[in-house]
């Protein structure tokens, strides 16, 4: 049995599809496409699926992936890509289908680009003068305070038409991750810059040595 990794972009209105709904979307798409995926056994068989580092609601991504299994001996991955894109909803585009070459637990970091209107630049630049940027990080079992400056020491702004943007790399492992929403919330709490004004785009998932996942 082969584990197949389907890589896709999730942009525009599709960024507001939750993980639970995304699972339903993929179940329907895989069935409608007719690709030879493997179903779990038992009383209620369903398509085996595993998402790598699921994306928070409202954030866009150029590097999403879902793993499925197939018993096909020589799957035509190009045909899979064409068949899946033919039935995908707007905002989701499969850009590669291939046999999985890395395990999801090898993901260590995620790269992002965050964009604000150009008027936000003076407020964002205030972050760079701070000695610390404490914010509460919630998990299933506890709430603890972390210093964002340990992970984002400064914001390097660049002009993008009527916008400004900056890039950052944050921990994204199974044991510890930082959602960029923590940074946008900090900027809202500290500088009065609404977090809803931020457009967050995940551009890459990376292993510990910096290689693409």
Image (cartoon, rainbow, N blue to C red):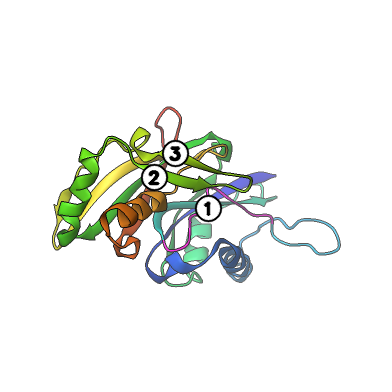
Q: Say which residue label 1 marks.
A: 54
Residue at 61% across, 61% down? 35
Q: Nearer the viewer, mark 3 or mark 1?
A: 3
Real-space Cα separation, disc 2 to disc 3, in angstroms = 24 Å
Q: Say which residue label 3 marks.
A: 146
- Assign a secondary structure to mark 3: strand
**Are the residues tagged 2 and 1 within 8 Å (C-beta)?**
no
From the top left corner, tell me how far across and down residue 157 is, in percent. 18, 47
Q: Nearer the viewer, residue 87 or 136?
A: 136
The residue range painted magenta reads 48-58
Q: Say which residue label 2 marks.
A: 204
- Assign a secondary structure to mark 2: strand
Residue 82 can be seen, yes or no:
yes
Res 110 quadrant in image:
top left
- Assign a secondary structure to mark 1: loop
140 relative to 40 in the view: left or right:
left
Farthest right residue in view:
43
- Badge 2 crowding class, 10 Å Cα cut-off, few under 14, some 14 to 19, many 20 or more, is some
Q: Earlier in the sequence, mark 3 or mark 1?
A: 1
Q: Earlier in the sequence, mark 2 or mark 1?
A: 1
């Amino acid at each position: 049995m082969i584990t197949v990794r389907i890589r896709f972009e999730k942009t525009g209105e599709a960024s507001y599809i939750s993980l639970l709904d995304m699972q339903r979307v993929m179940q329907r798409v895989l069935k409608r496409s007719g690709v030879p995926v493997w179903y779990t056994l038992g009383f209620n068989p369903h398509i085996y699926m595993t998402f790598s580092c699921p994306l928070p609601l409202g954030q866009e991504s150029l590097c999403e992936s879902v793993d499925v299994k197939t018993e096909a001996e020589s799957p035509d991955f190009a045909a899979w890509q064409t068949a899946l894109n033919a039935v995908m909803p707007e905002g989701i585009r499969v850009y590669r289908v291939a046999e999985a070459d890395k395990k999801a637990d090898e993901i260590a970091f995620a790269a992002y680009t965050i964009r604000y209107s150009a008027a936000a630049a003076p407020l964002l630049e205030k972050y760079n003068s701070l000695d610390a940027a404490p914010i509460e990080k919630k998990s299933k079992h506890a709430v603890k305070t972390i210093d964002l400056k340990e992970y984002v020491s400064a914001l390097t702004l660049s002009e993008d038409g009527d916008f400004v943007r900056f890039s950052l790399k944050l921990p994204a492992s199974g044991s510890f991750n930082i959602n960029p929403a923590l940074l946008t919330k900090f900027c809202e709490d500290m500088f009065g810059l609404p977090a809803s004004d931020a457009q967050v785009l995940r551009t890459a998932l990376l292993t510990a040595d910096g290689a693409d996942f």
